Image (cartoon, rainbow, N blue to C red):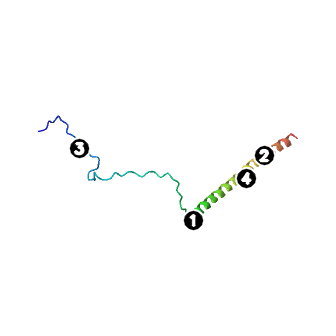
């Protein structure tokens, strides 16, 4: 009978159960850091340019509308100030 205070030697396995221990070691592939060229269909390129042009038209239209609104705002302020100055001048006469 074995001494219960002695630790038994563990069996060390470097492979999974059921795996062939004599099989070759599989290494991961080296990372490919090279430049790749993609074959993009003409339809995808056309749709991309259509989207870019559409967004550009929206941006330009918004920019023009904003400029017109700001011009109208400042012209209104100037006209209001001129009308107030004119009414003050008429009262003093």
> Could you give the CA–CA distance between mark 4 and mark 2, rounded to whole angstroms?
15 Å
User: In the image, which is nearer the foreground, mark 3 or mark 4?
Assistant: 3
Which SS class for mark 4? helix
Q: Are marks 3 and 4 in contact (CB under 8 Å)?
A: no
| Whether residue 41 is situated above or below residue 2 in the rendered picture | below
Comparing marks 1 and 4, which lies closer to the viewer? 1
Location of mark 1 (residue): 43
Residue 83 in the image: above or below residue 55? above
Among the two numbered marks 1 and 4 on one chain, the one whose residue lies closer to the N terminus: 1
- How far apart, in angstroms, are the residues tagged by discs 1 and 4? 37 Å
Q: In the picture, residue 89 is in which quadrant?
A: top right
Tell me where residue 55 sits by quadrant. Answer: bottom right
Q: CA distance from mark 2 to mark 3?
A: 94 Å
Q: Which residue is mark 2?
A: 78
Quarter holding the N terminus is: top left
**Which mark is on residue 77?**
none
């Amino acid at each position: 009978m074995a001494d219960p205070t002695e630790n038994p030697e563990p069996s060390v396995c470097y492979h999974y159960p059921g795996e062939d221990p004599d099989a070759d070691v599989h290494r991961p592939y080296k990372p490919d850091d090279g430049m790749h060229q993609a074959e993009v269909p003409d339809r995808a390129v056309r749709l991309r340019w259509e989207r870019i042009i559409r967004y550009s038209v929206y941006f330009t239209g918004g920019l023009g509308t904003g400029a017109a609104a700001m011009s109208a705002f400042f012209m209104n302020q100037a006209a209001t100030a001129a009308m107030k100055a004119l009414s003050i001048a008429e009262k003093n006469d």
